[in-house]
Image (cartoon, rainbow, N blue to C red):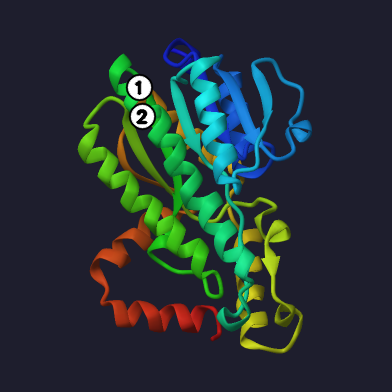
Amino acid sequence: MKKLGEIYRTALVTGGTSGLGLAFSEMLAGEGVKVASVSRKPDLLPKMEGLTGVSLDLSDTSAVLDFAEGYLREPGVPDLLVNNAGYGAFFEWSQFPEEEITRQIDVLFSAPISLCRAFAPKMADRESGGIVNISSIAGMFPLPYMPLYNASKAGLSSFSASLTLEYQSVPFVTDFRLGDFRTNFNKSASKGANVQADSSQARAWSQVARQLDSSPDPIIASRALRRVLRRRQGGIVYSGGFFQARIAPLLFRLAPSGILRTVLRYWYRL
């Protein structure tokens, strides 16, 4: 079986210094792909052949546009774009910080759109390439107190579906909908003060933390991504624990929305 490096020479991965992004980057580099891992702290990237860190703040819209323009000049259009970067913000809506509203949308939604805008048409002109947008089942089953995360992931899924209509095969566009994986996502999330109090927010956060602690290792997601890339599989792909990857999508299609809301409220003790 061919290694991915025989199919894709280069890849650009956002948020590649930890968690899922690091697992994706290490998998790709191990398969012989030259990976540029974009993040605010590229020095945290482990030393590995074929893996290079690039400094970029994805919450800075103008910086993202400048980066994409420069990247097209040198080194040029990547064979693969993986829009992975993201983080959580967990606040009661009445106390949701204004700056977090903007930052969540910029990092989770605007930056992937800008990078797709820069690279997808060039991939099509070249008649090769692929785009993987890392979304989430949170777009279908919202996490409480994380409205901008949920909305941005749902928007990214819808955006991917639109691109799939326009670019039927080149570039292939994958909406990679992930469940929970055991990463530092919760530790790095911004949180409201009530997370520490005896409140519905605290109860919900406790359940979110338990979910993450019992979730699969990110290597599971990287293996699923490898299968997607070998098949050049566009469209919607799920990955995660058995319930989240197999049962939850089925429930979303079949169960009435009111019942789903009731189940979520019960699950998160709201």
**Please, is residue 103 above or below residue 124 in the view?**
below
| Front one among 54 and 135 | 54
The image shows residue 22, relative to residue 139, as above or below, that is: above
Out of 49 and 87, give the one closest to the viewer: 87
Task: Point out residue 73 in the picture as x, y percentages from the top left corner.
Answer: 51, 16
Please tell me how crowded label 2 is: few (under 14), some (14-19), or many (20+) other residues with Cα within 10 Å. Answer: many
Placement of 31 over or under 234, stated as above or below: above
Q: Amino acid at mark 2?
A: Ala
Q: Which residue is mark 1?
A: 123
Residue 120, numbered label: 2
Which structural element holds mark 1? helix
Q: Residue at x 56, y 79 (%)?
A: 93
Could you tell me which quadrant the C terminus lies in? bottom right
**In what quadrant of the picture does the N terminus appear?**
top left
Would residue 18 appear left or right of 166 to someone viewing this image?
Answer: right
Q: Are marks 2 and 1 in contact (CB under 8 Å)?
A: yes
